[in-house]
């Protein structure tokens, strides 16, 4: 078992990208995203984080929302990525590729380009 | 899995109270980005923010989202063996809004600004003004009381009360002048 203390601190910068990627794979509702994250191993993630993040994604108009009736009363929101969200996701992966490439370089060659 | 009516009411109450903090936080993050652009943009966003604080459609949506999110989470907890009450308490604890965002950042900013602009010389001057005016008032008041009371002989034969009244009134007048000086220094520092 890998020691994952302080993982949530590292995740802060990339969680939006992770959630955007999950939403890009198909229509999904809020708590289902949390379940998906837990299944991926991100169990230490605070429950409130995804709720707050979804509000922000919606405010920043990165997602398209479809409302469907729920068993408990209020309509349930299902999220899909809109064009702006797709662009943001693409930019996220570009940033990620750059970062991970440099991190690998640092790890393998001490930061010296090959 | 269906939750009891009582628990659903508790969830609604919690969501109504907490969702507005999250909504405000989401809006503030957006606002923070915009704030850099111009004061005009900031005013516009503030108006928008004020609108969201009311029972707008957005606020109700955020509330509904939280109700569903919380009940989904509770259902998972119940499936793990929690009782309904335990699940509610755990969800309530985990979904409670914790601000480490703009509100606290703004407060920190204001404290930093205060300490950066804090001038020890101004505080020293204010203290000296108070002490100076207080001594001045006590001395003048005491002397005026002594003279008005009939001088040394009258003082020794029970007229000391006039001197005491003079000291007290002088002291109060001195404090009054000290406060006026404090206000003047504070206003000068603000400019």
Image (cartoon, rainbow, N blue to C red):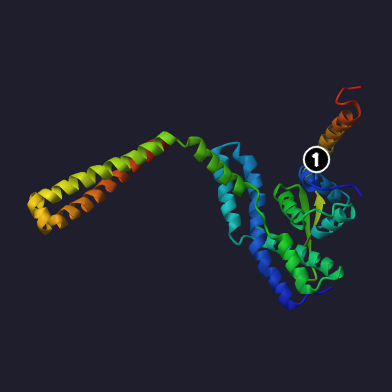
A93 or A69: nearer the viewer: A93
The N terminus of chain B is located in which quarter?
bottom right
Coordinates of residue B36 in the picture (x, y in percent) = 60, 37
The C terminus of chain B is located in which quarter?
top left
Residue A82 in view (yes/no):
no
Q: How crowded is mark 1: few (under 14 residues within 10 Å), some or many (20 or more)?
A: few
Query: Looking at the image, how many numbered discs can be counted on the residues?
Result: 1
Image: B109 above or below B146: above
Q: In this view, does A83 lie to the left or right of B145?
A: right
Residue B127 found in image quarter: top left
Coordinates of residue B90 in the picture (x, y in percent) = 75, 65
Coordinates of residue B79 in the picture (x, y in percent) = 86, 69
Q: In this view, does A4 lie to the left or right of B153?
A: right
Q: Name the residue under label 1.
A: A87
Q: In this view, does A39 lie to the left or right of A74?
A: right
Image: B10 above or below A46: below
Q: In this view, does B170 lie to the left or right of B123?
A: left
Residue B67 found in image quarter: bottom right
B27 or B90: nearer the viewer: B90
Residue at image coords 84%, 37%: A96
> In the rendered structure, the residue with mark 1 lies on which chain?
A
Task: Please tell me whether mark 1 sits on a helix, a strand or a loop.
Answer: helix
A97 or B41: nearer the viewer: A97
Residue at image coords 75%, 53%: A49
Residue A65 found in image quarter: bottom right
B149 or B155: nearer the viewer: B155
Residue A95 in view (yes/no):
yes
Q: Residue furthest bottom?
A: B5
């Amino acid at each position: 078992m890998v020691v994952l203390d302080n993982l949530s601190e590292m995740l802060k910068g990339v969680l939006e990208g992770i959630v955007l990627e999950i939403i890009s794979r198909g229509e999904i509702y809020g708590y289902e995203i949390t379940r998906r994250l837990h299944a991926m191993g991100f169990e230490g993630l605070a429950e409130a984080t995804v709720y707050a993040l979804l509000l922000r994604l919606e405010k920043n108009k990165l997602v398209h929302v479809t409302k469907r009736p729920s068993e408990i009363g209020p309509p349930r929101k299902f999220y899909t990525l809109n064009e702006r969200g797709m662009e943001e996701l693409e930019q996220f992966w570009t940033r990620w590729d750059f970062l991970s490439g440099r991190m690998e370089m640092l790890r393998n060659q001490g930061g010296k380009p090959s | 899995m269906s939750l009891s009516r009582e628990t659903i009411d508790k969830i609604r109450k919690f969501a109504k109270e907490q969702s507005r903090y999250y909504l405000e936080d989401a809006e503030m993050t957006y606002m923070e980005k915009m704030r850099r652009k111009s004061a005009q943009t900031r005013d516009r966003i503030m108006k928008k923010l004020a609108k969201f604080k009311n029972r707008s459609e957005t606020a109700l949506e955020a509330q509904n989202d939280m109700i569903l999110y919380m009940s989904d989470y509770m259902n998972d907890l119940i499936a793990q063996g929690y009782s309904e009450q335990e699940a509610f308490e755990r969800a309530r604890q985990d979904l409670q809004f914790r601000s480490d965002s703009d509100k606290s950042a703004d407060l920190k900013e204001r404290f930093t600004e205060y300490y950066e602009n804090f001038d020890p010389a101004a505080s020293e001057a204010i203290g000296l003004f108070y002490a100076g005016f207080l001594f001045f008032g006590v001395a003048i008041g005491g002397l005026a009381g002594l003279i008005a009371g009939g001088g040394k002989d009258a003082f020794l034969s029970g007229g000391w009360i006039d001197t005491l009244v003079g000291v007290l009134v002088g002291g109060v007048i001195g404090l009054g002048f000290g406060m006026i000086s404090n206000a003047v220094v504070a206003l000068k520092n603000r400019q």
